[in-house]
Image (cartoon, grey):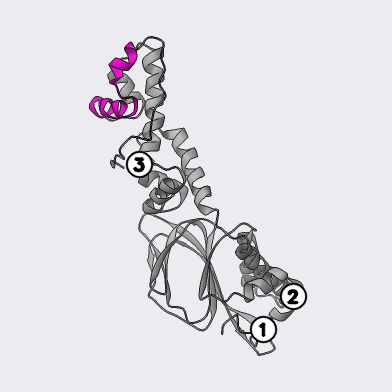
Amino acid sequence: MSIYASENRYAIINAFYILQLEEFHMDVHEHKRCEIMYVANGSCLVELNGQLTVLGERHFVFIDQNVPHRLIVEENVPCTVLNLEFSCSPNQSGTDLHYIKKRSSSFRNFLSKPQKYQLFFDNYNMLDCLKSLIDTLEKKHLDNQFLIELLFSQFFVLLSYCMQEGKRQDGIHYTKKAKEYIDEHYLEDISADLIANHVGINRSYLHTLFSKYENCSITNYINNLRVERAAFLLKNTSMSVTDIAFSTGFNSRQHFGYTFKKYFQRSPLQYRKLPGIYIKANTSSFTQHKSL
């Protein structure tokens, strides 16, 4: 039963789990229960009403009743998922949603905007709440019922807080995490797949985020760091161009020379001969290289 129907005053938990998945393909299905799928780490795909969306770390989705959906965990992209399913009905049993609505303006706002499903980013420690709730449910002690109701009520309030947050900040979070990893490893043999796995999202989503927040490709960002380092070595050491090429992460002198000239409009040797001039790399005119 839909959580948005005012007559469905009471909520009861029907199913719950925490799973670590290496690869998983769920069949499309729907049910009358409401559902939360939360990604604790890694990333996955969720199909909702025929539309695929990526859920990364600290993402979660709320699904109302009768929405066709399925979970997909791709090979080599492991994922930890927390799941909670609950039904809402007029039957006087379970957590009283009307009571929460009276006490929380955020929850009232959530209920006033019905949607088949909603995607969220966790800014309010929803993960800790879900873990505590599932852990308490698994213990199956009769004395835990009051604690379950408290945690379940907290869950609804945090859900509404996340909705109220407005624009999701996940893209900035993942881009920052990727940049930190690149800044530490750009001199090594790194790839977009390796970076995406470290961040916990898939490669295509990472490319989209860099285009959106950095206005360049992942390769451009890495090459910018590499040629800036190479320029420093050309001016401040007697290392050969070949040695500089390999020490800054390039796999050949030819690739290094081509890339360097694209950034600095001159070859490494021509740059080295410039007396006392340091020219900052210009990435705005560089054509994206798709080697990653």
Instruction: Compute the Cα span from label 2 to label 1.
Output: 15 Å
Residue found at the very far right of the displayed protein = 103
Residue found at the very far left of the displayed protein = 254
Q: Amino acid at mark 2?
A: Phe
Q: Amino acid at mark 1?
A: Tyr
Q: Is residue 209 left or right of residue 242?
A: right
Q: Amino acid at mark 3?
A: Ser
First in sequence: mark 3 or mark 2? 2
Front-most of residues 231 and 45: 231
Please indicate, yes or no, whether residue 214 appears anywhere in the rendered image.
Answer: yes
- How many residues crowd mark 1 within 10 Å: few (<14), some (14–19), many (20+)? many
| SS category of the residue bearing label 2 | helix
- Range drawn in magenta: 253-273
| SS category of the residue bearing label 1 | strand
First in sequence: mark 2 or mark 1? 1
Q: Going 42% across and 24% down the picture, which residue do you hit?
A: 280
Residue 260 within the magenta-colored segment of the rendering: yes
Give the main secondary structure of the magenta stretch.
helix
Q: Which mark is residue 146?
A: 2
Q: Which residue is mark 3?
A: 191
Please indicate, yes or no, whether residue 152 appears anywhere in the rendered image.
Answer: no
- Mark 2 or 1, which is nearer the eye? 1
- Mark 3 or 2, which is nearer the eye? 3
Q: Which residue is mark 1?
A: 10
Q: Going 49% across and 48% down the picture, which residue do you hit?
A: 174
What percent of the width, then of the height, locates residue 283? 38, 33
Instruction: Compute the Cα span from label 3 to label 2.
Output: 50 Å
Front-most of residues 261 and 27: 261
In terms of image quadrants, where is residue 129?
A: bottom right
- How many residues crowd mark 2 within 10 Å: few (<14), some (14–19), many (20+)? few
What percent of the width, then of the height, locates residue 146? 74, 75
Residue 284 within the magenta-colored segment of the rendering: no
